[in-house]
Image (spheres, helix red, strand yellow):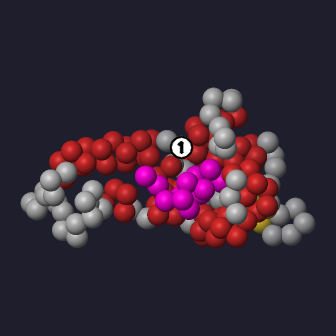
Amino acid sequence: MFSKACEYGIKATIHISHQSRLGKRVSLKEVASAIDSPVAFTAKILQSLASNNIIKSSQGINGGYSISKERQTQLSLHDIVIAIDGDKIIKNCALGLKECNNESPCPLHDKFKKVKDELLDMMLSTTILKLGDSVEKGQTVLVV
């Protein structure tokens, strides 16, 4: 459903969130290792997340990536998806048609619109704090 970059971006954000709550900043290599992603690919993803104000990047000896707890309560899954993949998951036609809307629907339009609406609602209502909490409590995992 999400692109590979978006999947890694979500996992990276959750990992950084969790580590930030422990008072730690994490390095690029630590993030890549934690989410089982190639370092170069992770660097591009983290750069995109930082430039979209999802994560904070600090340089220097005590540098690394972090997210304040206040910011974790504000950030939603939707914010990450938009930063990495844009809005195509919600806007695009299920069949890839250029023109698909209520006036000119594809055969899947009505059914897929319901799915997209539910997906959008879930992404908007799911905060990074909630996702990080589930990992911290051992209810979910990032890497299997």
Residue 69 is at least partly visible in this image = no
Instruction: Give the left or right position of residue 109, taking residue 33 as reference.
Output: left
Location of mark 1 (residue): 127
Q: Residue at x 68, y 29 (%)?
A: 137
- The answer to whether 130 is drawn above or below residue 29 in the figure is above
State which quarter of the image contains the C terminus. Answer: top right
Magenta-colored stretch includes residue 2: yes
Q: Quadrant of residue 44?
A: bottom right
Q: Residue at x 70, y 53 (%)?
A: 36
Instruction: Give the left or right position of residue 109, taking residue 87 as reference.
Output: left
Magenta-colored stretch includes residue 70: no
Q: Position of residue 26 (x, y in %)?
A: 79, 56
Q: Position of residue 87 (x, y in %)?
A: 39, 62
Q: Residue at x 68, y 58 (%)?
A: 37
Instruction: Read off the magenta span.
Output: 1-13
Q: Position of residue 140 (x, y in %)?
A: 62, 34
Q: Which amino acid type is marked by label 1?
A: Thr
